[in-house]
Image (spheres, grey):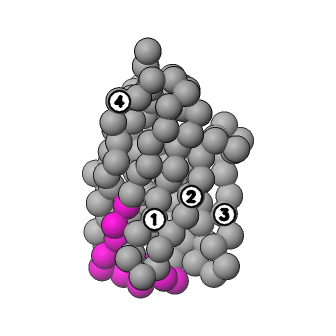
Amino acid sequence: VQLAESGGGFVQPGGSLRLSCVASGFTFSRSFMSWVRQAPGKDLEWVAGIYPLYNQTDYADSVKGRFTISRDNAKNTIYLQLDSLQTDDTAMYYCAKGGGLLRERPRGQGTQVTVSS
């Protein structure tokens, strides 16, 4: 399993970013995928997930209405659109494969999102 995130950066509160994650080494189109994040000194936090069939999505309450997860099975890629960013959204963002315990899900190296004025 290989996952490569990109798209992070520095943004002011209220700004937007779009994260991408390219996957390889497994049958992407049949896999549940998610985004998780880890802020400094805090545990991993689940952010959003997308199912392989019908692209059903689910979100943490903290990001619902602000973040949008999507996938392109032809490109083996998932995305996370981050809008109305807040300082509390500052974290390393990872894409992860499958379900189960967050820390046990295969994930990439991450992409840093920093929200600050």
- Three-letter amino acid code of the residue under disc 2: Ile
Query: Residue sitting at 30 percent across and 79 percent down?
Result: 25
Q: Which residue is mark 4?
A: 10
- Three-letter amino acid code of the residue under disc 4: Phe
Number of the label disc, if any, that sits on residue 65: none
Q: Which residue is mark 1?
A: 78
- Discs 1, 2 touching: Cβ within 8 Å: yes
Number of the label disc, if any, that sits on residue 57: 3
Alpha carbon distance from label 4 to label 1: 21 Å
- Discs 4, 1 touching: Cβ within 8 Å: no
Q: Quadrant of the C terminus?
A: top left
Q: Is residue 29 above or below residue 82?
A: below
Closer to us: 40 or 116? 116
The first of marks 3 and 1 along the sequence is 3
Alpha carbon distance from label 4 to label 3: 26 Å
Q: Which residue is mark 2?
A: 69
Alpha carbon distance from label 3 to label 1: 12 Å
- Discs 2, 3 touching: Cβ within 8 Å: yes
Q: Quadrant of the N terminus?
A: bottom left
The first of marks 2 and 3 along the sequence is 3
Alpha carbon distance from label 4 to label 2: 20 Å
In the rendered image, which quarter is residue 10 located in? top left
The first of marks 4 and 3 along the sequence is 4
Tag 4 secondary structure: strand
Q: Nearer the viewer, mark 4 or mark 3?
A: 4
Tag 1 secondary structure: strand
The first of marks 4 and 2 along the sequence is 4
Q: From this viewpoint, which residue is outermost toward the top? A: 117
Side of 45 where 53 appears, left or right:
right
The first of marks 1 and 2 along the sequence is 2
* Residue stretch rendered in magenta on the structure: 21-30
